[in-house]
Image (cartoon, rainbow, N blue to C red):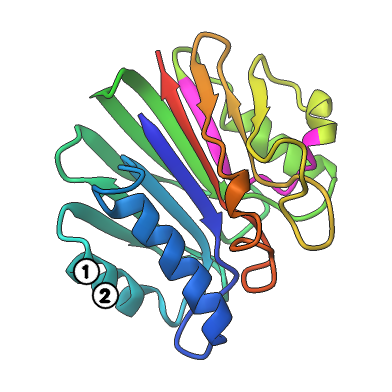
């Protein structure tokens, strides 16, 4: 199952052309059957005032994907796009503890070699106990699971999270946030195989001058 995630930093009608171009380029690469053939695309930090129009527009451009929008705080809405041909169920698991943001749960059944859960969120900013608690709480169940999104915990500090999961970063050690650090990565149960897709050749395109994060792309199988 191929998964992509990008914190698009409030991309919308009032955004700069550079920001719009980077986001549109990434979505096109993900959702065009001539490119990456992504099964699940997660966009976070969508401006809440824009999210419904944004989702409608994406559904019109990419009819082979189901598009779901989830409200959050002022600039923390989500958009989830899944292939209409895949057996994927999307639901909200309620708000993250301490934040007005949803935790999205994805149940996948036999999607390109993966059966299990995928949890998606924009976790609490800062290297603090609340961020670690949120990550721990959504990985407490058994079975196959994957967590990704804007993790907001530096990959270097993953050992501080009390979970049996294994962590994977997708940019060959390069930072994924303009202010430094690797904040966008993958946490998965030990029995899930994660294969990161190397998109470091697009470092100039995703230079964090538009959205202040870099996107990630990876495959999972169980």
Q: Is residue 6 above or below residue 147?
A: below
Question: In the displayed structure, does residue 45 sit left or right of residue 183?
Answer: left
Q: Quadrant of the N terminus?
A: top left
Give residue 57's mark: 2
Question: In the displayed structure, does residue 69 sit left or right of residue 8?
Answer: left
Circle 1 packing at 10 Å, graded few (<14), some (14-19), many (20+), is few
Q: Secondary structure at mark 1?
A: helix
Q: Residue at x 56, y 39 (%)?
A: 148
Is residue 147 within the magenta segment?
yes
Q: Quadrant of the C terminus?
A: top left
Q: Quadrant of residue 207?
A: bottom right
Question: In the displayed structure, does residue 131 sit left or right of residue 71?
Answer: right
Q: Is residue 183 above or below residue 189?
A: below
Kindly report which numbered mark, 2 or 1, lies closer to the viewer in this rendering: 1
* Magenta stretch bounds: 145-155
The reply to whether discs 2 and 1 touch (Cβ–Cβ < 8 Å) is yes
Give residue 61's mark: 1
Q: CA distance from mark 2 to mark 1?
A: 6 Å
Does residue 102 appear in the picture of this structure? no
Q: Residue at x 43, y 65 (%)?
A: 25
Q: Residue at x 46, y 45 (%)?
A: 4
Does residue 104 appear in the picture of this structure? yes
């Amino acid at each position: 199952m191929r998964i992509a995630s990008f914190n698009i930093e409030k991309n919308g009608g009032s955004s700069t052309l550079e920001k719009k171009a980077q986001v549109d380029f990434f979505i096109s690469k993900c959702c065009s059957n001539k490119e990456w053939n992504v099964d699940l695309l997660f966009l976070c930090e969508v401006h809440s005032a824009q999210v419904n129009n944004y989702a409608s527009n994406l559904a019109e451009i990419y009819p082979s994907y189901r598009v779901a929008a989830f409200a959050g705080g002022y600039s923390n809405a989500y958009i989830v796009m899944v292939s209409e041909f895949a057996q994927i169920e999307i639901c909200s698991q309620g708000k993250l503890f301490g934040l007005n943001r949803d935790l999205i749960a994805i149940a996948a059944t036999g999607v390109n070699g993966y059966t299990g859960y995928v949890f998606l969120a924009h976790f609490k900013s800062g290297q603090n106990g609340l961020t670690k608690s949120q990550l721990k709480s959504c990985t407490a169940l058994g079975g196959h699971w994957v967590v990704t999104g804007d993790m907001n915990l530096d990959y270097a500090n993953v050992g501080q999270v009390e979970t049996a999961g294994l962590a994977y970063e997708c940019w060959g050690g390069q930072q994924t946030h303009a202010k430094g650090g690797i904040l966008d990565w993958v946490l998965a149960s030990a029995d899930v195989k994660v294969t990161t897709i190397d998109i470091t050749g697009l470092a100039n395109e995703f230079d964090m001058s538009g959205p202040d994060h870099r996107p990630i792309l990876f495959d999972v199988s169980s």
